Amino acid sequence: MEIMAAAFMVMHLPITTYSLYAMLKLRFCPHMHDHGSRPENRRLVVEIVTNGQNPEIVEDIISRLGTYKTKFETWLLKEENDRFAYSANEMVVPAITIPKTAHAGR
């Protein structure tokens, strides 16, 4: 049992060491992290794809994205039968249909 615990610690030691290094670097060297700079004339777009079954979860994701310090556009790709009005830019696509002949050979 002790050998297994020691093996587990040895396996995770590099990850733990790097995590500690990353936390200390973030804490004491904030100038190295500018949170959101990107080249001029470039846009950062976040795309969320939904079928309309859980609009509350999608709205929660959109609201959480709004708390980030990075500037980006949020686009929502939804099917035409989804009537919920989301708080992001919406792009409507036709609903996907599977023809009955697609399953005929199975």
Image: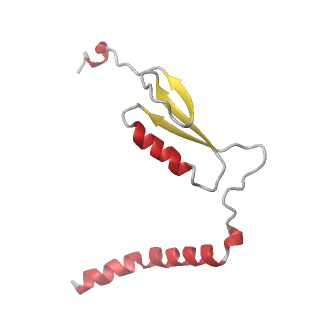
Q: Residue furthest right?
A: 40
| Number of numbered discs | 0
Image quadrant containing the C terminus: top left
Image: 37 above or below 13 = above
Side of 21 relative to 41 (left or right): left
Image quadrant containing the N terminus: bottom left
Side of 26 relative to 50 (left or right): right
Side of 4 relative to 37 (left or right): left
> Could you tell me residue 17's position as x and y percent?
49, 79
Give the residue at x 38% y 80%.
10
Image: 53 above or below 12 = above
> Could you tell me residue 101's position as x and y percent?
30, 13
> Could you tell me residue 79's position as x and y percent?
45, 25
Image: 65 above or below 52 = below
Q: Quadrant of residue 8?
A: bottom left
Give the residue at x 50% y 34%.
86
> Could you tell me residue 48's position as x and y percent?
50, 39
Give the residue at x 57% y 49%.
66
Q: Residue furthest bottom?
A: 2
Front residue of 43/99: it is 43
- The colour mode here is secondary structure
